[in-house]
Image (spheres, grey):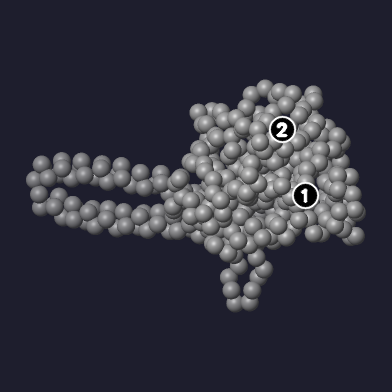
Amino acid sequence: MDKGGLYIGAGHVVGVAAQANEAGAMVYTYAYLQRKGEQMLLRGTGEASSIEALLKAIGTRVPIALCLDTPRCVHRVLHSTGTPEDLVAQAFPNAPLTDLRVGQWRMGQGTGLSMVRASEVRQVLEELVGQGARAVSLHIGPWALLGVLPLLGDLPLERTFGQHRFRFEEGSLADLERSTGVQQPELHIGEDRIPGAHALAFATAWSHLVPSADEIVTTDALVTDGQRQEKARRWYEGWMLGALAIMLLLLTGEQLLSRSLSDRRHLLEGSGADRAALARQVEEEKALLAERTALAQSLGLNAARRSAVLAAELASTVPDGIRLERLAVDPLSGTLKEREPAVFEHDAVLLRGTCSTTAALNTWMDTLRRHAPGRTVRLLGYSTDAQHPEPVFEISLEP
């Protein structure tokens, strides 16, 4: 499989699903996806029996979207909607939530929830990080599979894939049961053929690149750290590419000036044939300069920033039921330190506030996607505390 190599910008991720095979042994399946505009490229799939073998196959260059769906992961389907906290309390009454990691996905009037011990999640994450990998998103349970259903055609009454059998009623999630021993069908998505055993890994990568407002993203400190490292990599490589482009422009300008002075001297000393050759050379140099200028424009080196305009546009979309407490364009990527320059997350937007209902928040996130085309709208946090009776949310708009 292509391990990524040097690449610039976002759009690359390896979805990794930790599941058990028919014999009960742990298996790590993976699918490498790349997003190029509106196009999705499947660059490879496979499986490994250990994290060491996994990283040997996929490398540590491309970030990982991790999904845990082990036999110790407990699933529930609730035929109701509500705040994430209320649904967790209904699905797992009296469970010590501080010691658990929970995943959720809403589909119609049904909500799927999964929980697993935080120690099991941390064990996998620590082993990945310890061997140099970066996990940039965390998914618990098989619910990411629901995100690729629109790619598979009409919704049937039930579908078996990703080691699970889903049942649906009138477009809503109705029930779920494991089906480890059932032969998994191959997924046909466009021109790609995804082995059935790798369906959850593919869906996890898809869910990361195409976030859904129906999913409540699971968080972890190691994942948050991996996201910071990935943003730093994108900024650094983007800066290096910009510096290289500027260097090319300067070298081209120096070359043009040197040739111009030389050609003018020959023009004063030369014949009419020399002047004709010089005119052709000037036209060639003009074409080269136009090509370099177009490269600079495509890299955004000559584009004026519109931070204030973007902030005003986003603020105008805030609906009733949402109270916006913070809107930061190009926010700081960390705390300010004495005698060190400030580091910003260029072209990123951070939104924080409270909402009256989950539905109001989901509707606003859809509105943000329409007002910020080309950006990924991601829910970073959703919680309540004593100081905020209404749920507190944090949203990022990433380039």
Which corner quadrant of the image does residue 142 belong to? top right
> What crowding class fits label 1: few (fewer than 14 Cα within 10 Å), some (14-19), or many (20 or more)?
many
Q: How many marks?
A: 2
Near-viewer residue (63 or 78): 78
Indicate the quadrant containing the N terminus: top left, top right, bottom left or bottom right. Answer: top left
Q: Is residue 1 left or right of residue 112?
A: left
Q: Can residue 108 be seen?
A: no
Position of residue 47 in the picture relative to residue 370 (left or right): left
Residue 32: image location, x then y, percent: 53, 44
Which residue is rendered at x = 69% and y = 35% of the image?
179
Q: Which mark is residue 115?
A: 1
Residue occupying image coordinates x 66% and y 29%: 150
Amino acid type shown at disc 2:
Arg
Q: Which mark is residue 303?
A: none
Element assignment for label 1: strand
Q: Residue at x 58, y 39 (%)?
A: 198
Check the image and report above or below for 284 versus 127. Answer: above
Q: Earlier in the sequence, mark 2 or mark 1?
A: 1
Residue to which mark 2 is pinned: 165
Residue at point 36% right, 54% down?
249
Q: Is residue 270 left or right of residue 200?
A: left
Image location (x, y in percent) of residue 237: 48, 57
Spot occupied by residue 117 in the image (x, y as percentages of width and height)? 76, 56
Across and down, in percent, residue 185 comes to 60, 30
Asked if residue 113 shows in the view, the reply is yes
The quarter of the displayed image where residue 220 is located:
bottom right
Query: Callout 2: few (<14), some (14-19), or many (20+) C-alpha neighbours within 10 Å?
Result: some
- Say which of 308 and 32 sits in front: 32
| Foreground pick, 354 / 217 | 217
Q: Secondary structure at mark 2?
A: strand
